[in-house]
Image (spheres, rainbow, N blue to C red):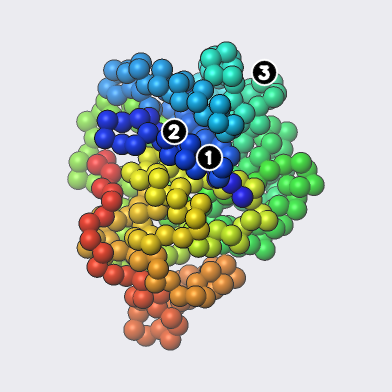
C-alpha cells in the first residue's frame, strides 16, 4: 500500500510539501493537485478578489517537474461540484483540453485526472486516452451499480467514504473492479461528517467561492453544517462515528487498496499526517490528523489517539452502523456499553486548526 497526497503551494512560513514528499517518496505513489486558476474541490490556488499571482503557476510547474523526476504519478483535479452554464459546453471541453495539452508540453503530462463531471471524464477519454480518469470522492459512488453506470468514462473510483469501515462490503466492490479492470481508492483521513446532509450545499459553495467572495455575505450564520452541529457538546460523539481510519488500523486495508488518499491540500501539518500513516501510528490529538479537523470545537479537550480500546477497529468495522441505536461510542450514563468518547477525551492543549471564517 502506498499513499496519494495533496499538493500545497510553498509558503513563507511552511515547509515545502515537495520536500516532505521527497523524504517519504518510497511510500507515496501519487500527488493530486488543481490547476492554478481553476475551481476545484477547494478554493482556487492563484486568484483572490480578481488578483492573480501568476508566480504560483511557475511554482506549481517547477514542483510538478520535480515530482515527476521522483517517479511519482501526477493526478490533476477537475473536481469542482459545479461548472455552471458551461457544464457541457465546448468552452469547458476546450479548457480541459488546453490544460492537459499544456501539462503534456510543460511538465511531461499527467498520469491521472480526477473529476466530478462525467462530461469532463468523457472529454479526457476522447482527447487524452492515455490519462487514467478517476471519479472524485465527492461523487459519492459507493455501489456496483453506481460504478457500472459510468464505467465507459472512468477507469478508477474513489469509494464513497461512508463505506470505509465495512471491509466485507469493500471486498464486494473490489471483486467487481478487478473483473472489470478498474481500480478503487480510499480516502483515509476525512474529517467530514458521515452522511453529511450539508455536503452538496458546501461543495457547490466551494465551486463558486470566487463569486461568493465578491458578495456581501451574512455574517451571523456559519454555512458549514459540521461546525454548527458540533457546537453542542452532546453531538461531539458523532466525530467517532465518521469515516476516518486511524493510522494504527490502516494495515487492514492492504489487500483492498493499492493506493490510499490522504487529505493534505489544506492541512496545516501535512508532514504529521504523512508520517502517521506511513509509520502506522500517531501519538497526539486524533483531530489534528483530519481535514477538516475540529480541534477548536473540542478545545480545551482533545481526542488522545493512544487511548482507543483494543477492540475499537473490530467493533466499528463489523457493526450495523445504526449509531442512533448503539451505545459503544456514546458517552451517556444510562448505557451499559463501553463509552469510548469518555475514555479518549483528555485536556490536551491548544488545537492546531481554526474554524473557517465563512
How many labels, in total? 3
Tell me what residue is drawn at x 56 percent, y 37 percent: 30
Q: Residue at x 49, y 75 (%)?
A: 310
Where does residue 175 sit, x and y in percent of width and height?
A: 75, 53
Q: Mark 2 or mark 3: which is in front?
A: 2
Name the residue that disc number 3 marks: 127
Residue occupying the point 66% across, 21% down: 128
Which residue in the protein does label 2 denote? 18
For residue 131, which quarter of the picture? top right
The Cα atoms of the two marked residues, 2 and 1, are separated by 10 Å
First in sequence: mark 3 vs mark 1: 1
Residue 281, position as x, y percentages in the image: 46, 60
Q: Position of residue 159 (x, y in %)?
A: 60, 49
Mark toward the start of the polypeptide (2 vs 3): 2
Q: Secondary structure at mark 3?
A: helix
| Residue 171, placed above or below residue 237 | above
Amino acid at each position: 500500500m502506498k499513499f496519494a497526497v495533496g499538493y500545497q503551494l510553498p509558503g513563507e512560513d511552511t515547509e515545502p510539501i515537495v520536500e516532505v514528499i521527497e523524504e517519504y517518496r518510497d511510500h507515496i505513489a501519487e500527488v493530486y493537485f488543481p490547476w492554478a486558476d481553476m475551481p476545484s474541490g477547494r478554493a482556487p490556488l492563484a486568484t483572490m478578489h480578481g488578483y492573480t499571482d501568476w508566480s504560483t503557476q511557475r511554482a506549481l510547474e517547477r514542483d510538478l517537474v520535480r515530482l515527476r523526476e521522483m517517479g511519482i504519478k501526477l493526478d490533476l483535479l477537475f473536481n469542482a461540484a459545479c461548472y455552471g452554464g458551461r457544464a457541457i459546453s465546448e468552452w469547458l471541453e476546450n479548457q480541459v483540453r488546453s490544460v492537459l495539452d499544456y501539462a503534456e508540453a510543460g511538465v511531461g503530462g499527467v498520469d491521472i485526472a480526477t473529476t466530478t463531471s462525467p462530461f469532463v471524464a468523457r472529454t479526457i477519454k476522447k482527447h487524452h486516452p492515455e490519462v487514467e480518469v478517476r471519479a472524485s470522492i465527492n461523487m459519492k459512488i459507493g455501489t456496483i451499480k453506481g460504478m457500472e453506470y459510468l464505467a465507459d468514462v472512468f477507469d478508477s473510483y474513489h469509494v464513497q467514504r461512508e463505506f470505509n469501515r465495512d471491509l466485507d462490503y469493500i471486498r464486494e466492490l473490489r471483486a467487481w473492479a478487478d473483473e472489470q479492470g478498474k481500480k478503487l481508492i480510499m480516502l483515509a483521513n476525512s474529517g467530514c461528517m458521515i452522511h453529511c446532509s450539508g455536503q452538496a450545499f458546501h461543495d457547490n459553495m466551494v465551486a463558486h467561492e470566487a463569486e461568493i467572495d465578491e458578495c456581501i455575505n451574512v455574517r451571523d450564520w456559519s454555512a458549514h453544517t459540521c461546525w454548527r452541529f458540533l457546537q453542542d457538546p452532546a453531538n461531539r460523539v458523532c466525530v467517532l462515528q465518521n469515516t476516518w481510519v486511524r493510522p494504527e488500523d490502516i494495515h487492514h486495508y492492504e489487500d483492498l487498496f493499492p493506493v490510499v488518499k490522504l487529505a493534505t491540500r489544506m492541512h496545516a501539518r501535512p508532514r504529521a499526517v504523512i508520517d502517521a500513516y506511513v509509520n502506522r501510528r500517531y501519538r497526539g490529538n486524533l483531530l489534528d490528523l483530519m481535514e477538516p479537523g475540529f480541534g477548536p470545537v473540542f478545545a480545551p479537550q482533545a481526542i488522545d489517539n493512544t487511548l482507543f480500546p483494543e477492540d475499537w477497529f473490530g467493533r466499528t468495522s463489523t457493526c450495523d452502523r445504526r449509531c442512533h441505536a448503539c451505545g459503544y461510542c456514546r458517552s451517556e450514563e444510562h448505557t451499559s456499553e463501553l463509552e469510548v468518547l469518555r475514555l479518549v477525551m483528555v485536556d490536551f492543549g491548544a488545537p492546531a486548526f481554526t474554524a473557517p471564517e465563512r
